[in-house]
Image: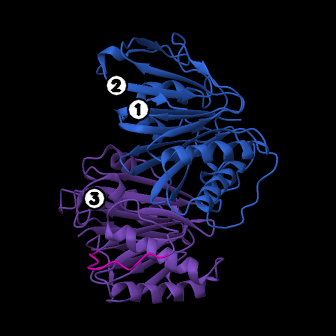
Chain colours: A blue, B purple
Amino acid sequence: MCQLMGMNCNVPTDICFSFEGFRRRGGETDHHADGWGIGFFEGRGCRLFIDWQASTASPIAELVRSYPIKSTNVISHIRKATVGKVSLANTHPFLRELWGQYWLFAHNGDLKTLPALSAERFLPVGDTDSEHAFCWLLEQLSARFPAKPDAATLQTALSELAAELSRHGTLNFLLSNGEWLAAHCATNLHYIVRKAPFGQAHLIDQDISVDFDALTTPNDRVALIATQPLTDNEAWTKMQTGELVVFVDGQPTR
Amino acid sequence: MCQLMGMNCNVPTDICFSFEGFRRRGGETDHHADGWGIGFFEGRGCRLFIDWQASTASPIAELVRSYPIKSTNVISHIRKATVGKVSLANTHPFLRELWGQYWLFAHNGDLKTLPALSAERFLPVGDTDSEHAFCWLLEQLSARFPAKPDAATLQTALSELAAELSRHGTLNFLLSNGEWLAAHCATNLHYIVRKAPFGQAHLIDQDISVDFDALTTPNDRVALIATQPLTDNEAWTKMQTGELVVFVDGQPTR
């Protein structure tokens, strides 16, 4: 299995603090050492860093930890290979373009069967069930909607498709088109919303604290989503099996 | 205008030496300071680093310069914005998936008119003529060939499409699907093939030399393609207007 981390905010925010804890799970505090990746939306653009090395050893992870890239939507993944060998092509998050927007996807879980890809518009490059599932989701969306529908219609479709895809296996995923971030829970996914009054947060995976009050303005709002909570002094909400939450501007909307 | 650099080799090779010189053109030895990017194929996977900062100032460029990522196909671009503002979404190279392969594209030149995109299968995310041209190329290829054709057929189609696209303006580009690297010249594109016996190379943009004989094996072959030559003691071949050269295993094939 793998671990997921996502962030959705109302103002561009860096993820250095959370990533510092999360990356430790890639070989130090946990055993997800078969590659890692992180994607940052900046406006319509998207930066994707992926590496087949463990996140604790990767020079690119060291850059991401120390270089504060500010983003409103971030998806990160550390991999424990189950389906597909350790390689760059099998490293999450995966990136595609649909309706003139980039889409990022990362998955935790195993699909026992794979839904058929009929249109061949989106094809997996690597060998993972996860990339196949992502291609299927986009194929279904593009078949239903030749052009991008309004957000509510799109998110309803996404809920239906996630439920259908869940019949094939365990499906925890994070998905973003740069406007919102959707989190789907099968087994483990937790989130927290940080907003004023901000307090201190202390990492579970490393003895580091941060005082968000000193780093934020009163209007900032940041939602953080992770397979397992990243801090031990904040109240994380555990998502329910089959639940899809769409985060917009740093808060859950449905 | 912008500058392009590409590499195609028969064994995975790092591009640190050439990138050291090339990045200087992003604000030091030349004025292409409106962002930069570099993409590396590793097997079927592709790593893409892009930044809207100048390549001389970017922490990510510093990482790429110092971290020897070994690849058989690399495309890099430094940008002097002409069409489209400075932003991540407008930063080359651009990445898409077709036939289950990643495709990387970078462009130097201006298209005065844009060919129509009818299928809406590939849409630009940013505002550049370059990304639009890339989407058009992929749309045309996918319309001609529902599945990937053999290399000769594909490359013939590519020549025809590049000629058609050239009617719209200035089209120097580099394109790769990870198996080969195609270079199309409108105004400026040069290449060199390094093979045994290897010698010394000295950068134009910085006083640094390297002795490739000490770093290679006798069977290595590396083709380097750039808008302007990167070294001052090697014989670069200037490409002709309208010429498309496809590099495979470190040598021009057509």
Quarter of the rendering containing residue B107: bottom left
Label annotation for residue A9: 1
Residue with the mark numbered 3: B208
Is disc 2 in contact with disc 1, using a CB cutoff of under 8 Å? yes
Label annotation for residue A238: none
Q: Magenta region: which residues?
A: B109-118
Where residue A16 sits: x, y (%)?
41, 29
Verify whether residue A139 appears in magenta.
Answer: no
Where residue A12 sits: x, y (%)?
34, 35
- Crowding near the residue tagged with mark 1, few <14, some 14–19, many ≥20 C-alpha atoms within 10 Å: many
* Mark 3 or mark 1, whichever is nearer to me: 1
Verify whether residue B113 appears in magenta.
Answer: yes
* Mark 3 or mark 2, whichever is nearer to me: 2
Where residue A68 sits: x, y (%)?
35, 34
Q: Amino acid at mark 1?
A: Cys
- As drawn, is A239 to the left or to the right of B229? right
Q: Is residue A222 above or below residue B223?
A: above
Q: Is residue A53 above or below residue A206?
A: below
Decide which of tag 2 and tag 1 comes sooner along the chain. Answer: 1
Residue with the mark numbered 2: A220
Q: Amino acid at mark 3?
A: Ile
Secondary structure under tag 2 reads loop
Residue at horizontal 62%, vertical 70%? B99
Residue closer to the observer: B16 or A138: A138
Where residue B160 sits: x, y (%)?
46, 90
- Callout 3 and callout 1 share a chain: no
- As drawn, is A58 to the left or to the right of B229? right
Disc 1 sits on a residue from what chain?
Answer: A
